[in-house]
Image (cartoon, helix red, strand yellow):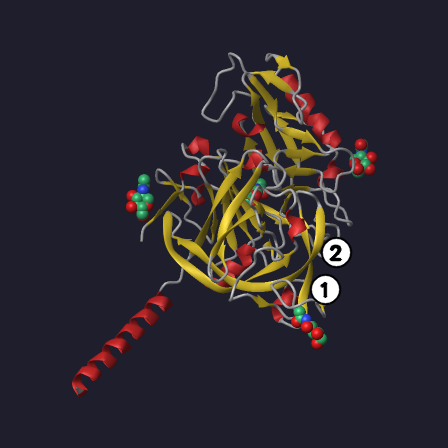
Amino acid sequence: MASSSYLVFLSFFLFLTISQAQAKAFQPKALLLPVTKDSSLLQYTTQIKQRTPLVPIKLTIDVGGRFMWVDCEKGYVSSSYRPVPCDSKICKISRSGACLVMCPAPPRPGCNNNTCYHLLYNPLTDTINSGVMAADAVLVQSTDGRSAGPLVSVPGLFFACGTHSLLKGLSNGAKGIAGLGRSLVSLPSLFASAFKFQRIFAMCLSSSSQSNGVIIFGDGPYEFQFKKEISSSLMYTPLILNPKATAGKYSEDPSTDYFIRLTSIKINGQAVQLNDSLLNIDKEGNGGTKISTVNPYTMMERSIFKAVLKVFMEETKGMTRVASVKPFEYCISSKNLGSTRVGPPVPAIDLGLHNESVSWRIFGMNSMVQVKDDVLCLGFVDGGFNPRTSVVIGGHQLEDNLLQFDLVKRRLGFSSSLLFMQTTCANFNFTSSV
Ligand SMILES: *[C@@H]1O[C@H](CO)[C@@H](O)[C@H](O)[C@H]1NC(C)=O
Ligand SMILES: *[C@@H]1O[C@H](CO)[C@@H](O)[C@H](O)[C@H]1NC(C)=O
Ligand SMILES: *[C@@H]1O[C@H](CO)[C@@H](O)[C@H](O)[C@H]1NC(C)=O
Ligand SMILES: *[C@@H]1O[C@H](CO)[C@@H](O)[C@H](O)[C@H]1NC(C)=O
């Protein structure tokens, strides 16, 4: 009798020790989220498991977004939901600037007294609405950078709780925005602090809506089939801080968008005449060049757009121009044009960056858009006069390029087209090793 209960105690103790040891031992070095292209609305979405019980939440990706926000008004059920009080450290870090002292309704997710207040931004409709900070459980897949690893949980991942009406314009079924921006409360920052890895993430958008691209939170390796390791062949350019907000125009805070220093554009080696003052960011935060996942195509201030178009037309004189197809201005016939490994054989466009030796080369795959059979258009759009940001590098130009955002070293690593390395963003191995 005595000995058997001793045994039970012992094995229970052993079990506890082992599971604690395992929980301690498994510290993921990186996490991953799959990225799906919505080819009708031209958005990139992901799915994250949140709440108790866990439910998959579809979110549109905003690479410059301050934080993750979701609709808490409709269908939010969770026993692990926690409001974030106004006087908390995370509220201060999030640069809230306001407190929801009293919510005039029965308590529910998104409505509690004394909660950290924010204005939430929908970049697709350019609208803002009020919200509050909260925390809830999240389950996410770890990775070693080569394939998927064990699922890991974050018991209280901070996010913002918004209204149902703010979802307008998002991909069908999306419940909010996955913000990856330059802030201390974006997903890359929160995941890094939850698992004590560096504030670095890589984003690789697939050009196909049939097979997923990937975001890897954490440092490399970033391996794509078949055995192509990309982190060792990146070029780097500094990430520039824009001192003024570029989303929602509501605050005096620095922008959470990722800006880079574009200094020149060459097409087939021919320099495009550009107005330098538009390429710099002024004191009010106007101008400069940023990276966006919510603009499907690169948008350029009108004088830049016209100048690029002029040189591109000169360099493609031998090709057959056809009627333009909105939203594009310059289209050519692709009949008898042939193709290369990196897309249609059009002149390469080089974005010259912070110094002469660093440029981002854009090949046909990323410069041209197939709008119908036999018609290709230059995939840049006119941003009009006086846009907030002079050049916004959009999704089509980012596809099948790996970008690494390093918030510690404040630099962007970029691969140019992965097709040159005979792989694509859809070639990450999502098969779990466990
Ligand atoms: C907020 O506080 C007021 C006054 O104490 C109370 O009547 C109300 O029910 C509270 N609301 C919530 C959402 O907790
Ligand atoms: C360059 O752009 C700035 C800012 O928009 C404008 O004030 C200036 O007139 C432009 N210069 C030229 C030569 O077009
Ligand atoms: C250009 O920038 C790269 C990356 O920051 C650096 O390694 C290189 O030394 C720079 N070249 C010159 C000529 O300044
Ligand atoms: C994908 O990863 C799994 C798990 O690590 C591995 O068993 C499989 O061989 C990998 N597939 C390829 C094609 O490399």
Q: Is residue 166 above or below residue 79?
A: above
Q: Is disc 2's CB within 8 Å of ligand 2?
A: no
Crowd tier of the residue under label 2, counting other residues whose Cα lies within 10 Å: few below 14, some 14–19, many 20 or above: some
Which residue is drawn at the image coordinates 52% and 27% (left, top)? 365
Q: Is disc 1's CB within 8 Å of ligand 1?
A: no
Residue ID for mark 2: 251
**Callout 2, which amino acid?**
Ser
Where does the image place residue 191, in percent across and percent down from the top left?
50, 59
Image region (quadrant) for ligand 1: bottom right
**In terms of sequence position, does the residue under pointer 2 or pointer 1 come before the other?**
1
Q: Is residue 415 above or below residue 257?
A: above
The disc label shown at residue 97, or none: 1
Local SS, label 1: loop
Residue that lies at the very extreme toward the bottom in this rendered image: 2
Residue 386 appears left or right of 359: right
Viewer-side residue, 215 vs 317: 215
Crowd tier of the residue under label 1, counting other residues whose Cα lies within 10 Å: few below 14, some 14–19, many 20 or above: few
Give the CA distance from mark 2 to mark 1.
9 Å
Q: How many marks?
A: 2
Quadrant position of residue 409: bottom right
The disc label shown at residue 175, or none: none
Note whether residue 184 is visible.
no
**Callout 1, which amino acid?**
Gly
Where does the image place residue 332, in percent across and percent down from the top left?
60, 17
